Amino acid sequence: MRAYVASLKFGYRQITRDNMLLLMIFGPILCGVIFKYGIPILEEYISERYGLGKVLVPYYLLFDTLLSYIALNLICTVSSFIILEEHDDDVAAYLFVTPIGYSGYIFTRIITPIIIAFFLSLVVMLFFNLSELSFPLILSLIFLSMLYSAAVTLFTVSKAKNKVEGLALTKLSGVVFVGLLVPFFVNTNIQFLFGVLPSFWLAKASVSYGTSFFIPSILLGAICSAFWILIFYNKFKNKLF
Amino acid sequence: MRMLNSIRNDMKFQQKYGFYIVYMIITLSYIGILLFLPNSIRDVVKGIILFSDPAALGMFFMGAIILFEKSERVLDSIFVSPIKVDEYILSKVFSLSLISTTVGLAVVLATKFTTGNLVSLIIGLMLGSIFFSLIGLIVAVRVNSLNRFMLGIIPLGTIISFPPFLLFFDINNFILEIFPSVIIMKLILAGVGIVEINYVYSVVLIGWIFIFWLWARRNVIKMIKSLSGI
């Protein structure tokens, strides 16, 4: 336990040393404020300027789904950069021979940040969601976002040999984001081709809320992310040992 | 010759660390998304995508490249070689601008290039990439960790990238017209056929690049001095 606390303190020091804590806390809040107040202003402007009806309102749920993922994404990106720096500096190798071990390292560098991000996401979603989402839907979205973020973080750190590749892969993982758009824009069953992407199930759960497909969407989303987590967890382990 | 070798080495580095594969996948994704969009908004979205990614990619990748060179002590070797500071900067920004221009052109040509101005597009992507890469370089040489780089580049990048979006709200004035990122956006929008471009602004952009080049140069020299303990 003491080793875990020491490792957490070490990680915390790295974050505070770089003032990253400010970005991690205020970044998602700033996004929430922009979404909550900026998007309706933009909507009003587009309606007046171009004489169109509601252009963005039908996609408020999409913005909310995106918001549920932002805090987790930001904190997990910071975590993956810390892991990559530790790997580049060979610090990680020393941590594994301490009582923390591999699972302890994953716990302090990925799981703990995700748990912290959960609470931050909850605050951001409760205060800044646009569609007046119900509490169960908010919790479900954050739950799926947590698993999705863990999968993305493990993907980056398991595949990247150094921070340059890490940044390239962080960029690439943004492509997975496409899945978030699919349930909102594709109505046919072709959409399920994107079912391999955790982001697809996050959006699918959003649009299915109130229907019989809501619970299956969450379960399938959790299974999809768990599948990727398992693959990249083992890949990262193989890479390190 | 030395310059060409330097560019070739930077391109090899980018290939080795997966930049080309990553951008191939990203390009295909952009093309897929754009083809899926209705014609009425496709060109506007295309312009925004080209401005915010291919044109600005160097801003982020420059950070990773410089930090990696610092941590692997590549810089010590580079600066004891005959290569000059300007050649070092030129090699980096030019090789990154080649990716930007190729990606941008691929996206535009694959999603029906109709009435846009191809010359304007190439100038916008090329100069835009050089400008943003210089910003990345200016920040990267001053920091020692990727997170610290992000902390510097995100606010700076946001401040620089925000003004062009005012164009979509018909907000325009002289200061905006000579603002570097606004010029880059206009060149790209002219490239996809949304606005007409006055090439005089390209000259203004080159002036901005010159100023940022001098700034980057000063920072790189400081970095070399700190590496050699002077």
Image: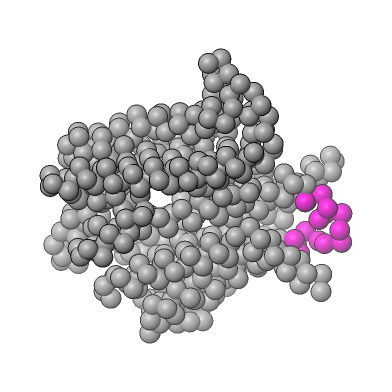
Residue shown at the point (26%, 65%) measured from the top left: A190
Residue B203 magenta-drawn? no
Give residue A119's quadrant in the image: top left
Q: Position of residue A12 (x, y in %)?
A: 54, 26
Judging from the image, the colouring scheme is one colour
Residue A91, horizontal then vertical, whole percent: 67, 33
Residue that protrudes farthest toward the bottom in the picture: B114
Toward the viewer: B9 or A241? A241
Q: Nearer the viewer, residue A210 or B206?
A: A210
| Quadrant of the rendering where the N terminus of chain B is positioned | bottom right
Q: Is residue B1 visible?
A: yes
**Which of the pair A44/A159 is nearer the observer?**
A159
Q: Nearer the viewer, residue A232 or A163?
A: A232
Q: Bounds of the magenta span? A: B74-88
The vertical placement of A21 against B102, above or below, is above
Please provide percent x and percent y for residue B78: 81, 55
